Every structure is written in structure tokens, then in C-alpha cells.
Amino acid sequence: MSDNTTPYLPEEMFGVVTASGSAPRAFISPQRYVQGLGVLDRLGEFLGLVGSTNAALLASSRAQQIEGARAERALTAEGIPSRFATFGGDCTLDEVDTHVNRLRGSAVDVIVSLGGGKCVDTGKAVAHRLGLPVVVVPTLASNDAPCSALSVMYRTDGTSTGVEFYPNSPALVLVDTGIIASAPERFLVSGMGDAMATWYEARVAIENPLGFSSIRGRPTIAAAAIGEACAATLFEHGVGAAAAVAAGIVDSSLEDVVEANTLLSGIGFESGGLAAAHGVAQSCNAVAQVHDNYLHGEMVAFGLLTQLVMEERESEARRVAEFFCSVGLPAHLGHLSLAPTDTHSLTVIADGTVNFPTTPNMPMRVDRPFVLSAFAEAHRIGTAAVSDLGDVAYRRHHA
Ligand SMILES: [Zn+2]
């Protein structure tokens, strides 16, 4: 089997302007999405749908003990042989090459990626190189990696080298809500920060006639509707879902929010589009005290407040800030260990935002002074919300 090493660039496929003057509408998604309590124990049956007969289970050594052992039993029950591939902790080219070299020429015909966002992204990269389907079994609802056809690649020092895209989306995403409910509440809440931005960022891409989705096509009505449903679900069930995870139980609020964080947010960002909120969030990684202490969705939360200020949507910014207070997401700079007087750090984040590839979806000129003034105003709105509603939930996650 020859490795599939040709880089795939979705802009060459979907970003080509048609005779009508804009890119074509394009929508992609995983082939199958299954979510429920205990569904991991039926992994073997679902792999039958994919047509796979021999699986590699990519999981950390910790995950192999618990969820991995369950996955192995579920496959054995259906007569599907499997082997573990131990995930080392980072989605780097070295990690990917190690697994590709070990699995090349073997009987394995599917990669099952079982873990958090970086393990999921590594599994996608390995499967692509081997020309195999990938099945994603997320153990956290903190990120929207599971449903997308891309991986965020990292260097060994933890900084990102950018995004790698794939022509195929996952063949199956299997989310066992019992596993999500047993993870710390902060992970689910962080996923809500990432997911809440989905609709507002997609709306920017849709309303700007020159706007583009993550696969560089024009967003569809379908992606817009999915993004809007994502935000509505979080406003309605976010607090209830956080309470369910804190109690370690699976209820309908948790099921709804897990779907919002994983399926709706995943499709919404990929086929809807990103804008300044993710520009701010990814640029926060350049500031050590933020990168070392906060999760992706927590950075996206403050990025979203900043973006809404840029759009002059103050009442929506206030509503979102109140939601953040209620579930414990960062609502102001202090919640990311930043001070409004820390000009150096804020300038680094502002410059990163200006240069981020999805910032051009914003309908106005975005330069350093504009971003810095949006930070100050977002901080003011969030601080006012905290003084009215308190930040008990935030302090519980960051005790
Ligand atoms: Zn994100």
C-alpha cells in the first residue's frame, strides 16, 4: 500500500469562483453520528456498517485501561480483531509517522480514534495517510474535533503548525454520553464556549458576500440552521447539562448539549465558517499564562465577546456574557489571567488576530487599534455582567 501523502487543499476544490462571481455552496459532514448512554459497547455492530473487519484502536495508555478495554470487548463480541496503538499525547508529524510506519502493510482496515481532541486529530491524520476510514470515539465534549475532516497539527513544544485537511470526513462518530458525564465539568463547559461561537462566526461568513467557510466554499442554509440551533440549545440547556456532569448523570439536557458541542458545532464551524472569535482564541496561545492555564473553548469565549463588540452587537454581547457567567466560562480579561493594562500581551493577541486566516470574514477593516479597543469594550461588558450575576461557576472550575 502506498501512503497517501499528497496535501489536500479544500480551497482548490470548493474555493473556485463560479460564473456567478462567488464560490459554490459546499457542505460536508461525517457519514454517521451516533450518540447515547453506553453506545461504546456496541462499537463492533457499528463497525459492521463501516464495513471494517480489523481495527487499530488509537488511545492513550490511560484510555486503553478503561474505554479502550470496553471497545476491545465490543469488537471481540462481533468477531473483529483489534490492536492498540498508544497515543503519545500530542498531534505532531512524528507521532503520526510512528503509527503509520507500524500499521503500514498490516491487516488493519479502520482506525478507531478514542480520546480527546489531539488523539482524534492524530487518528484522522494516520487514517488519511494509510487510505483508511477513521472512526472517532471522543472521551470529552470539550472541542469540535470529532466531526471535522481536518487536524490541527502541533510542534513538540506545543505551538501549532497549522491545519491539515482531508478529502474524507470520519466514517462514524460514536459518542458515549456516559463517558462524557464522567469527565470533569470544566471540559463540557469549555466545549460550550467553542460551540457558542459557532453561530455568531458562521453568521459573519454568511452575511459577508465575500465570506467563506472552513472548507472555503460559501456557507449553506443547512450549515446556518445547524449553527443557530447550536446556540439556541446552549442557551436553553447549558446550565442543566453542566449540573448533570457535576452530578455524574446523563439526562436530556446533557444529551442536547453534547450534540451541540460535538455535532452541531463541528458541522457549523466546518461548513458555516469562522471569523474573529477563533482568531482571538488561537492568538491567545502565544501568551504563556493563557496557553498554559486555559482550554481552547475558554479562549474562544472571550474571543466571541470581542467579535460581537467589533460587530457593534452590544445586547448580544451582554446576553452571551451572562451565559458565560452562568456556566463558568471566561467573561472578562481577568478570567484569562490577563489585565487590561497588560499592553504587551494584548498587543501580541491583537496582532495574531489581525493576521488570522478567518479574520478577513469580518466585514470591516480589522487592525491592531480596532482589536485593542474591542478587547477593552468586551472586558467592560463582561465585567458588568459578572458584577450583576457573579462568577461562582467560573471560580468552581478554577479553584
Ligand atoms: Zn474551536
Image (cartoon, rainbow, N blue to C red):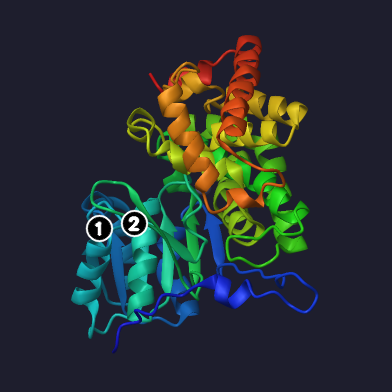
The residue lying toward the viewer, choosing from 159 and 63, is 159
The residue lying toward the viewer, choosing from 90 and 44, is: 90
Q: Can residue 112 be seen in this view?
A: no
Mark on residue 342? none
Q: Which residue is drawn at 34% across and 56% down?
A: 119
Name above or below for residue 219 compared with residue 155.
below
Q: What crowding class fits label 1: few (fewer than 14 Cα within 10 Å), some (14-19), or many (20 or more)?
A: many
Q: Is 237 left, or right, of 191 in this rendering?
A: right
Residue of label 2: 119
- Residue closest to the eye, 39 or 263: 263
Q: In this view, does 395 lie to the left or right of 274?
A: left
Q: Identify the secondary structure beneath mark 1.
A: loop
Figure check: 377 above or below 146? above
Tell me if 6 is positioned left or right of 268 in this view: left
- Residue type pointed to by label 1: Phe
Q: In which quarter of the image is the C terminus?
A: top left
Residue found 61% across the figure and 59% down from its top: 267
Alpha carbon separation for disc pair 1 and 2: 7 Å
Instruction: Tell me the tag on residue 87.
Output: 1
Q: In which image quadrant can residue 41 be found? A: bottom left
